[in-house]
């Protein structure tokens, strides 16, 4: 092994450095996006006629997905598989709580629960889905490709 492939260490002498410039990680252009994100993006395009009216609430397909997805994403986030909770997580939760309190004050308990609940579901649910299932540049690129496919297709 030539001398120039060794890195000198003052305390430990010479240590070999492994250099493999041709074997760097190559991004997969056909990477699949996680199914909750793909399904959420498709369900956003569903017409309002596909909604289910439950009392005073209109539950569209993407809202139904968010109801299930928020539980899955929160469980995954709390388990630590997606890193620890960060300040942004707490700020999103605080924002939704603040909106809920404001709507209680403005419109009463019923209006606050209906409007604030749906707002909290959409804001927190979409954030948690993205936070948990879009983790690196490959995921962002796959989401962008799906987004362009849905817009142009």
Image (spheres, rainbow, N blue to C red):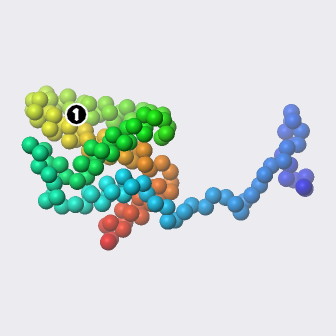
- The local secondary structure at tag 1 comes to helix
Query: Image height check: is 4 above or below 55?
Result: below
Q: Quadrant of residue 73?
A: top left
Q: Residue at x 46, y 35 (%)?
A: 79
Q: Position of residue 67 (x, y in %)?
A: 27, 44
Q: Quadrant of residue 91?
A: top left
- Residue 13: in sight, yes or no? yes
Which quadrant: the N terminus? bottom right
Residue 25: x percent and y percent?
63, 58
Tally the numbered discs. 1
Q: Residue farthest to the bottom?
A: 153
The 10 Å Cα crowd at callout 1, few under 14, some 14 to 19, many 20 or more, is: some
Quarter in which the C terminus is drawn: bottom left
Tell me residue 137's x, y (percent): 50, 54
Residue at figure coordinates x 14%, y 51% from the top left = 52
Q: Nearer the viewer, residue 20 or 82?
A: 82
Residue 88 visible (yes or no): no
Whole-percent x and y of residue 138? 50, 57
Residue 95 lies in quadrant? top left
| Disc 1: which residue | 99
- Nearest the eye: 70 or 6: 70
Residue at 25 percent across and 30 percent down: it is 98
Tell me what residue is drawn at x 27 percent, y 35 percent.
96
Q: Is residue 27 left or right of residue 86?
A: right
């Amino acid at each position: 092994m030539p001398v120039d492939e060794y890195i000198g260490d003052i305390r430990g002498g010479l240590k070999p450095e492994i250099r493999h410039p041709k074997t760097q990680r190559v991004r997969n252009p056909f990477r699949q996006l996680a199914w909750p994100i793909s399904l959420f993006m498709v369900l956003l395009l569903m017409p309002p006629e596909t909604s289910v009216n439950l009392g005073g609430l209109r539950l569209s397909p993407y809202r139904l997905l968010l109801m299930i997805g928020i539980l899955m994403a929160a469980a995954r986030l709390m388990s630590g598989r997606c890193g620890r909770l960060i300040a942004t997580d707490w700020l999103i939760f605080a924002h939704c709580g603040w909106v809920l309190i404001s709507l209680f004050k403005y419109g009463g308990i019923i209006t606050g629960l209906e409007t604030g609940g749906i707002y909290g579901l959409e804001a927190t649910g979409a954030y948690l889905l993205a936070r948990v299932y879009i983790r690196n540049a490959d995921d962002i690129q796959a989401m962008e490709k799906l987004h362009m496919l849905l817009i142009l297709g």
